[in-house]
Amino acid sequence: MFISVLQNLADRQLKTRYVVATDTSKDTLIRITRHVSRALGTGKVKVVDQEDAMLNRDITVNEILECQFFD
């Protein structure tokens, strides 16, 4: 998919020039979360599945749905 987009851009004679960049870092979301937790809190991170999160009364359904990007 990404290669076809680049090929499409290369085939066109565009008036506007584009810069394409990629992120080659090895950091994962859980690693970033752990670093933020260490810097701002206790450093403790617990990964829970959606069903267990739904049982927690301290977490609203909207908060759970906002976190869907972690899957």
Image (tube, rainbow, N blue to C red):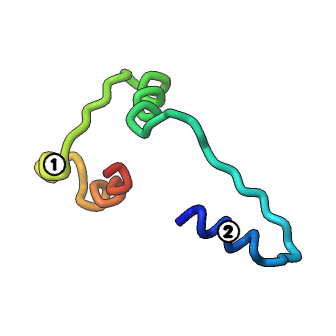
Identify the residue at horizontal 19%, vertical 51% (top origin).
50
Q: Report the residue marked by disc 2.
A: 7
| Residue type at tag 2 | Gln
Identify the residue at horizontal 13%, vertical 52% (top origin).
51
Residue 68 coordinates in the image, percent (x, y): 32, 56
Q: Is residue 33 left or right of residue 24?
A: left
Identify the residue at horizontal 24%, vertical 49% (top origin).
59
Q: 4 or 55, which lies in front?
A: 4
Give residue 43's mark. none
Q: Is residue 60 left or right of residue 24?
A: left
Q: 9 or 29, which lies in front?
A: 9
Task: Describe the element under mark 1 as helix, strand or loop.
Answer: loop
Task: Describe the element under mark 2 as helix, strand or loop.
Answer: helix
For marks 2 and 1, the one nearer the N-term is 2
Mark 2 vs mark 1, CA separation in Å: 50 Å
Could you tell me how many numbered marks the image carries? Answer: 2
Q: Report the residue marked by disc 1.
A: 57
| Residue type at tag 1 | Arg
- Residue 62: image quadrant is bottom left
Tell me, yes or no, whether the two marked residues, 2 and 1, touch with CB atoms within 8 Å: no
Q: Is residue 56 left or right of residue 21?
A: left
